[in-house]
Amino acid sequence: SNPRRAGSEKGPVFDERPLKLRTFPQPEDVHDILSLSKFGSEALLKNGYCVFDNVLPLDECEALLQEVIETDKGGPLTSGKVGGGQTSGKKEEMLVNQNIRNDKIMWVNHETDEEKCPAVCKLLTEYMDMIVGGMNEHLLNHCIIQGRTKAMVACYPGSADHGTYYTKHVDNPVRDGRVITCILYLNKDWNGEDKGGVLRAFPTATPEDYVD
C-alpha cells in the first residue's frame, strides 16, 4: 500500500509527474469474448495490465451511465472507504479518509440488485464474467478464477481544485484471493490531459515504472 497514505494529515498526496498517455495494442475483434479473454490473459502475464477500447456498444454505455446517475438521485452514493476492503471480512476496520479518497460509491450484487441496477448487472453477467472466466484456460499455470466479488460503482465529481481522487493504493492489501481488477469507464469523449481523471498504474515495484 502507499507508504505515505497513513500519515497524510496535511492532505492527500498526489503524483504530479507528467502524463504518459499512449495507444494500447488491441485484439483483432474487441466484441468477441474469446478473443478478449485470450488477448487479456497474454497482456496481463506480460505487462501486469491490459486496456480494451470500445468493448461495449455505445447505447449500452449510455444506459449504464444513465442508470448510475438515476440511482444516485434516488439514494445518493456514499463516501468510499479504506481499510480491510469490502470483501475482506474486516468491514469494522473500514473508515472514511479523505486524504486517501473522496469519491462516491455503491456496491452492486447481481444476485440481489438486478431490479435496482439492471444495466450494471447485465454488464457483470454478460460481459465481465464471461471475459474473465474465459481467461482460466490461459492462466492455468498461474491462477484459477473461481468467482467475483460485488461490483463497485464509483463517481468522481469534478471541482476547481484537485477534484475527486483516490490516491496511490494497493487494491487488495489483505490478500483475500482477488487477483484481477476490471474497470469500465463511462465518460464519453473524455480527455484526460484537459480534465484529469486518469488512472495511474504501477505494474512493477519500481516507482518510475508507471502507466497512464
Image (tube, helix red, strand yellow):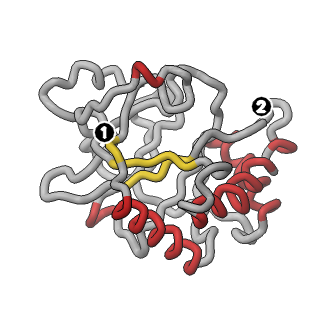
Kind of residue at disc 1: Arg
12 vs 117, nearest the viewer: 117
45 vs 132, nearest the viewer: 132
Q: Position of residue 8 (x, y in %)?
A: 20, 25
Check disc 1 and report the residue beneath it: 101
Q: Residue at x 52, y 63 (%)?
A: 23
Side (left or right) of 191 relative to 109: left
The residue carrying pointer 2 sits among few (fewer than 14), some (14 to 19) or many (20 or more) residues within 10 Å by Cα, namely few
Q: Earlier in the sequence, mark 1 or mark 2?
A: 1
Q: Position of residue 20 (x, y in %)?
A: 39, 53
Kind of residue at disc 2: Cys
Picture layout, residue 138 above or below residue 25: above
Check disc 2 and report the residue beneath it: 143
The tag on residue 186 is: none
- Find the distance from the CA under tag 1 to the CA under tag 2: 30 Å
Q: Quadrant of residue 78?
A: top left
Q: Position of residue 44 (x, y in %)?
A: 66, 43
Side (left or right) of 193 relative to 205: left
**Dot 2: element:** loop
Q: Residue at x 78, y 30 (%)?
A: 142
Dots 1 and 2: beta carbons under 8 Å? no
**Dot 1: element:** loop
Q: Nearer the viewer, mark 1 or mark 2?
A: 1
- Total count of labels: 2
**From the image, which quarter does the N terminus lie in?**
top left
Side (left or right) of 57 relative to 36: left
Picture layout, residue 205 above or below residue 50: above
Picture layout, residue 188 above or below residue 102: below
